[in-house]
């Protein structure tokens, strides 16, 4: 019997394409995952900065009358109005009996758009303070809603002080408001005398309110 021929060695199999593709996908996925984590980290850092409580100026109650007049011009430069954080509850008593239009955020009547409109144009027209007392109530959103119901965009006009422009002011005046409000041009004295301020005993108060205004904490 003739000798058997040696069995032919099987040719090596080519590397499976599926494995290469899987490895590539894995690398791509890892890269995407790393990128996503980096983006998320940056977003968290940015959010942390946004959530940081604004700096609060501390004043004594005896300095209140002077402080709200902005003697150093810081609030005017920042285009903001004072937010008074007063756990002593003395500022409310003082402001209630000064030359001001004093409104309470818990009062539906005071926060009604028409009542608030008259208080606002009266304070501007006669160079007085418009005070909104929040007490321990978080009524900032209610206030903003009333302002926007009066006139769309009024919140920004009031907060950034552009309400002091004659055109912005006159847009709030109606024919029923009387001749003393019609075709009125501001004098510099009245511009300097008008102040819009919010008073609260909550500490810290609403963070949006803190950012939109110039916070001052009152101490005895």
Image (tube, rainbow, N blue to C red):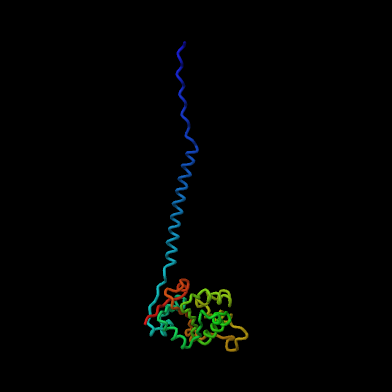
Q: Residue at x 47, y 30 (%)?
A: 13
Q: Report the number of numbered marks.
A: 0
Q: Is residue 107 left or right of residue 49?
A: right
Instruction: Spot the residue most to the top.
Output: 1
The quadrant in which the C terminus is found is bottom left
Residue 93 percent coordinates (x, y) = 44, 86
Nearer to us in this view, 127 or 83: 83
Q: Residue at x 46, y 20 (%)?
A: 7
Q: Quadrant of residue 37?
A: bottom left
Residue 133 percent coordinates (x, y) = 48, 80
Q: Residue at x 42, y 73 (%)?
A: 204
Q: Quadrant of residue 200?
A: bottom left
Q: Is residue 202 left or right of residue 176?
A: left
From this view, report whether residue 13 is shown above or below residue 191: above
From this view, report whether residue 123 is shown above or below residue 27: below
Q: Residue at x 44, y 63 (%)?
A: 47
From this view, report whether residue 115 is shown above or below residue 2: below
Residue 142 percent coordinates (x, y) = 53, 75
Nearer to us in this view, 114 or 194: 114
Residue 9 percent coordinates (x, y) = 45, 24
């Amino acid at each position: 019997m003739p000798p058997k021929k040696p069995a032919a060695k099987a040719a090596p199999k080519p590397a499976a394409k599926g494995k290469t593709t899987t490895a590539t996908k894995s690398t791509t996925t890892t890269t995407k995952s790393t990128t996503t984590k980096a983006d998320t980290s940056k977003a968290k850092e940015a959010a942390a900065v946004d959530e940081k409580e604004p700096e609060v100026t501390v004043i004594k109650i005896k300095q209140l009358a002077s402080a709200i007049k902005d003697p150093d011009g810081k609030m005017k430069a920042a285009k903001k109005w004072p937010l008074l954080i007063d756990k002593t509850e003395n500022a409310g008593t003082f402001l209630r009996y000064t030359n001001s239009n004093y409104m309470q955020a818990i009062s539906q009547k005071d926060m009604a758009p028409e009542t608030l409109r008259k208080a606002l144009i009266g304070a501007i027209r006669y160079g007085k303070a418009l005070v909104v007392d929040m007490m321990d109530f978080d009524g900032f959103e209610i206030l903003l809603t009333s302002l926007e119901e009066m006139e769309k965009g009024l919140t920004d006009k009031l907060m950034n002080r552009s309400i002091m422009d004659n055109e912005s002011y006159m847009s709030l005046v109606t024919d029923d408001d009387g001749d003393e409000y019609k075709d009125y041009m501001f004098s510099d004295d009245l511009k300097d005398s008008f102040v819009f301020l919010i008073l609260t005993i909550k500490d810290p108060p609403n963070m949006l309110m803190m950012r939109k205004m110039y916070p001052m904490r009152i101490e005895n």
